[in-house]
Amino acid sequence: EGEHVGQFYYPHFISISGNRVAVSDQLNHRVQVFDCFGNYHYKLGEPGSEPGQLSCPFGVCIDGNGHIAVSDHDNNRIQFFDENGDVK
């Protein structure tokens, strides 16, 4: 349990597509993205309600183009990020 890279505070969902693994890290208000070997690549989100910010993300899904959809629970929305982690 923790807030550093590769640590989680209530991980909730995981999505795998190709070589990428996305894990919703609910109480750290982010999604962490790794390769299939567990090497950290980047994170999506930070606490808040602005575009690109997350509040208790639940579900996460990677589509065939590498885009990531995140169920942003406490903000009552779905956010979409491109393959580089930028908000769409």
Image (cartoon, rainbow, N blue to C red):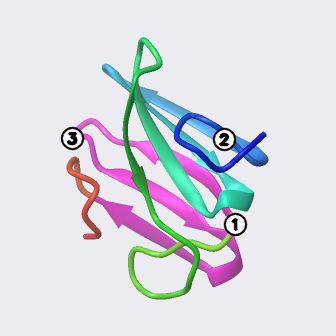
Residue 79, position in %: x, y?
44, 69
- Left or right of 61: which side holds 2? right
Q: Which residue is mark 1?
A: 56
Looking at the image, which residue sits at the far top? 37
Question: Could you say which is closer to the camera, residue 32 or residue 83?
Answer: 32
Q: Which residue is mark 2?
A: 13
Task: For label 2, count other residues whose C-alpha is less than 10 Å away and answer few (under 14), some (14-19) or many (20+).
Answer: some
Q: Secondary structure at mark 2?
A: strand
Earlier in the chain: of badge 2 and badge 3, it is 2
Task: Identify the residue shown where x is 40% and y is 22%.
Answer: 39
- Which is closer to the viewer, label 1 or label 3? 1
Q: Which residue is mark 3?
A: 65
Quadrant that contains the C terminus: bottom left
Q: Secondary structure at mark 3?
A: loop
Which amino acid type is marked by label 2? Phe
Residue 87, position in %: x, y?
29, 69
Residue 11, position in %: x, y?
72, 43
- Which is closer to the viewer, label 2 or label 3? 2
Which amino acid type is marked by label 1? Cys
Task: Identify the residue shown where x is 22% and y is 47%.
Answer: 83
Cα separation, mark 2 vs mark 1, equals: 12 Å
Q: Which segment did they paint magenta?
A: 57-81
Q: Secondary structure at mark 1?
A: loop
Task: Identify the residue shown where x is 58% and y is 75%.
Answer: 47
Q: Is residue 45 above or below residue 37?
A: below
Cα separation, mark 2 vs mark 3, equals: 20 Å
